[in-house]
Image: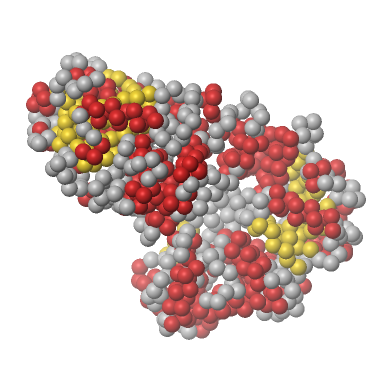
Amino acid sequence: MTLDERLQNVSVVGAAGKMGSGIAVLIAAQMAELKEKNPDVLYRLNLIDISKKGLIGLGSYMKKQLIKHAEKSINAIRELYANRDDLVENTEMIDNFVFESMQVCNLTNNLDAARDSDLVFEAIIEDIPTKLKVLGRLKEICKDDVIYYTNTSSVPIGLLDEKLGLNGRIVGYHFYNPPVIQKLVEVITNDKTDEEAKALGMELGKRLRKKLVPANDISGFIGNGHFARDGLHGLNEVERLTGEGFSIPEAVYIVNKVSQTLLIRPMGIFQLIDYVGVDVFWAIFEVMREHIPDPTLKNDLLNKMMEVGVKGGQNPDGTQVDGFLQYKKSRPVGVYDISSGSNIPIEGEWKEKLDKYIGPLPEGCQPWRSMLVDPNKGQKLERYFANLRRSDTAGAKLAVGYLERSREIGQMLVDTGVADSPQDVNDVLLNGFFHIYGPINNY
Amino acid sequence: MAKFRKPVYVTAGYNTIALGPGRKEWRPKDTRPGIEHYVKEAGMGALNQVNDPANIDEGVLGNFMMSRYCRQGNRPGFIPMIHPALEKKPATGTEGACGSGGLALTVAIKSILADVAETVLCVGVEVQNSVKSVYGADILAGAGHYAGQRKTGHAHFFPGKFSDRAGFYFKKYNKPEATREAMALWYANAIENARLNPKAQEYYNDLEDPFAVGMTPPNPKAFCENINYYDCSKVTDAGTALIFASEEGLARLGVDKKDAAEVISYGQAESDITRTPDDLSVLWTTKAAVERALKDANLTINDIGVFEFHDCFSIGGIIALESVGLAEPGRGPDFVKAGRIKRSGDHPINTTGGLIGYGHPVGASGVRQAVDILHQLTGKAGDCQIQIDPNRPYGLSISMGGDDITVICTIYKKTGI
């Protein structure tokens, strides 16, 4: 079966979730394009979720996202409708495209709706027993040649394949959050993966204009393989600083600021953990530890945050929920103090003392956003990191340690066969995490 | 038409800030001021410079598409909103796409020459940020021929049109690289001048090397084949106003002649909107309008000391240099590269930023240009002020609607010379 044929009937399971809803938007848009080219074919996208409330919100989320998608793809959409005399202005074309995309969708609680699908995207909770249960049920009802794309970020697909007997017809298809915007998809396969499933996955990714990076089937893969250990390094640095007499909130502030400002990253490490969700971050370790014999993949402070239920993540409107940091309009304004259960505002003497400890910013330090669009960023980064290494402030030392640990993690992912090359590791960090430079570098 | 039968002056110029991406006040998610705000601020900005608003005889409002951007028609009705003294006085609205502001100037001039008014308040306004640019493109495309061009046109329509002009120009003169460089220099010139103009949209632009950014290769998939984002004027909300007056009118307003500039001629030209010229390397209508204005003023292009070009796109500015006779055909890029358009050059163009630097509130731009020429000729241009050569005390502005369809060229003279 060709990809076009398989795209006639698709199901997304866990469609109301953060990842599932994004995947739903991307596939609905694909179907709207195909519909225009094949007006006699019936297209159907089953959006399945156990949450009724989630499904109610899904429709309006999709409409909003499809409008944005169509606006961004206006050149392609004008081409698609070039022969439609009834559609002249961008406005008319975008409206029509969104209408056609919404029309293929079937929002339902019933998993059995996936029965006739030829492609199934699974984007449910990152929990092995639940994944086994849902995929097991799908195997019972779906056709034998259906292909499963699982949006896991850490569960080995070999394990799912083996336990369920899917004959290699399952591919790890790890979108980044939010899937509609993020360019990166990690495609996870192993030596048992069905060739057709693999090839169609690559073809689909290209069609969705995603940057595909192959990763091997080792828990955490490339993205979380790096992120988890990078975050762990941040947590360990917090522990070290508390040994030097800083309180936990003070240490969190220092490490967050250094990992953003001095490393010229889009977010500090604790802001990133909050963005992903403290609970999701925690769950990555839970899954990884089951498959990788590395007892250091855990952290006390992280466990305590879970115990007190400070979990980060996003509100339904996309605003940031408090986690390690407290947010106003998605900008950090405070740091959580686990001992008192309240937030300490980032201001005044408290902040000044810590900024003084970090020290003056090395010459050439420039915010991530302005560096991102700087036409001479290669040279500037080289000069800046040379200055960073020469600087003997506490902040610079912390940053250099961070830089080296990040490189070590990247190299380890290559050495242990998770990634095929340093370039693949760098591609994931550049495209999935919006870093300006990859972890494996000469800085 | 020959020389004006009596002197016409402009005075009391005022521009609001050009609000849009790039300004510090720009908050895309917040509610923004509407047309009422800009008309009021600009209109009062002008009226506050004269003795009594009651001395204004009539008003004119230049605007392109408030009907679609703001779902508002009946433009003249906003003139009395500015001040109670304008209530029940005559008012007119003009629409000629991006040349609407230029048309408003001609209405004011004609009223004075016809002796039906001694003083005319001329206002320009456009509020475009009410819709996203992808929908704004549909609205602006109305400046082209809807039935004949919109369906086959680019998603962003006018960038597509000027990308075609750039492509045609590259091919005709076989120097795409040199032209590309001149386009980036045009952008850099706009930014350098805008940084001196606190009202400009690019006032806060702190790019280290605007030229390097202007050299960004075009991306046909995301935008256009031959131009990049920096070659384009941005989407802008702004209002602008000035007062036209006869000699008697100036006296009535209590305005000293040194605070005014004389309008000595205007050339207006129109082309068939349903047709596209074969040779895209010339702005034929612009050429006709400028030649007419120069002839009526009995001047040559080299007599002009300061220019306002309608540079909605950098390539349009470069082609205009040739069309008005400043540069030989095919030599526009050399003219720019020699630095002649810079504020320090012998033909300073767009000294306050132009459409790329100040911003392009489409239907208001023609009026904004008149205000900035007035300020240059009366020494009121602030940090943007250039030294006006006493042998060339003239300013020339070109207001262009659509892809060289509606064009108004106006020539001004410093007073007291």
For the point 48% across and 66% down, which residue is it?
A377
A299 or B207, which is in the foreground?
Answer: B207
Vertical side of B252 occupied by A50: above or below? below
Question: Which residue occupies the foreground of this view, A54 or A222?
Answer: A222
| Residue A92 in the figure: left or right of residue A241 | right
Image quadrant in which you'd find residue A73: top right
Instruction: Examine the rendering and report whether any part of residue A2 can be seen.
Output: yes
The quadrant holding residue A107 is: top right
In the rendered image, residue B372, in percent from the top left (x then y), is placed at 24, 39
Query: Where in the figure is residue B96, as x and y percent of width and height?
Result: 38, 25
Q: Is residue A164 above or below residue A105?
A: below
Which residue is located at x 75 percent, y 78 percent? A293
Q: Is residue A212 left or right of residue B119?
A: right
Image side of residue B249 versus residue A91, left or right:
left
Residue ID at (45%, 69%): A380
The image shows residue B402 at horizontal and vertical percentages of: 42, 30
Seen from the viewer's position, the closer of residues B32 and B330 is B330
- Give the quarter of the image for residue B82: top left
